[in-house]
Image (cartoon, rainbow, N blue to C red):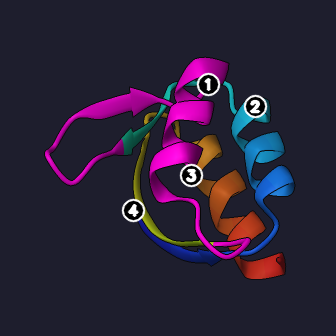
Amino acid sequence: MKISNIKNIDGFFQVIDSCVGKVELVTGEGDRLNLKSKLSQYVSLANIFSNGEIPELELVAHEKEDVDRLMNFMINS
């Protein structure tokens, strides 16, 4: 799933932390970073963070309830 214009970055990572399954960030090179790992969260922030928001990312969530959780965050944020 592609998501964009994440302005509440703390809230976004709280949702990621609450997911039960693996949630991965797909890089431009096709690599996948496990966003449940704090180290991967810091690395991903360093690479894509600009102007207080994340413009766009591609995520893979392996559990349906996690997809629903992420969609709910995007709709209500």
Towards the viewer: 8 or 16 = 8
Q: Amino acid at mark 3?
A: Val
Label 2: few (<14), some (14–19) or many (≥20) C-alpha neighbours in 10 Å: some
Q: Would you say residue 37 is visible in this rendering? A: no
**Residue placed at 16% from the left, 43% from the top?**
30
Residues at marks 3 and 4 touching, judged by CB atoms closer than 8 Å = yes
Q: Nearer the viewer, mark 4 or mark 1?
A: 1
Q: Nearer the viewer, mark 3 or mark 1?
A: 1
Q: What is the secondary structure assignment of the residue under circle 2?
A: helix
First in residue order: circle 3 vs circle 1: 1
Q: Is residue 51 magenta?
A: yes
Relative to 16, 40 lies left or right:
left
Instruction: From the image, tell me which residue sits under label 2.
Output: 17
Q: Amino acid at mark 2?
A: Asp
Q: Which residues are magenta?
A: 26-53
First in residue order: circle 4 vs circle 1: 4
First in residue order: circle 2 vs circle 3: 2
Specify the label residue 53 is tagged with: none
Instruction: From the image, tell me which residue sits under label 4.
Output: 1
Q: How many angstroms separate mark 3 from mark 4 (CA)?
A: 9 Å
Instruction: From the image, tell me which residue sits under label 1.
Output: 36
Relative to 68, 9 lies left or right:
right
First in residue order: circle 3 vs circle 4: 4
Q: Nearer the viewer, mark 2 or mark 3?
A: 2
Q: How many angstroms separate mark 4 from mark 1 (CA)?
A: 17 Å
First in residue order: circle 1 vs circle 2: 2
**Residue placed at 21% from the left, 54% from the top?**
28
Q: Amino acid at mark 1?
A: Lys
Towards the viewer: 66 or 45 = 45
Q: Nearer the viewer, mark 3 or mark 4?
A: 4
Residues at marks 1 and 2 touching, judged by CB atoms closer than 8 Å = yes
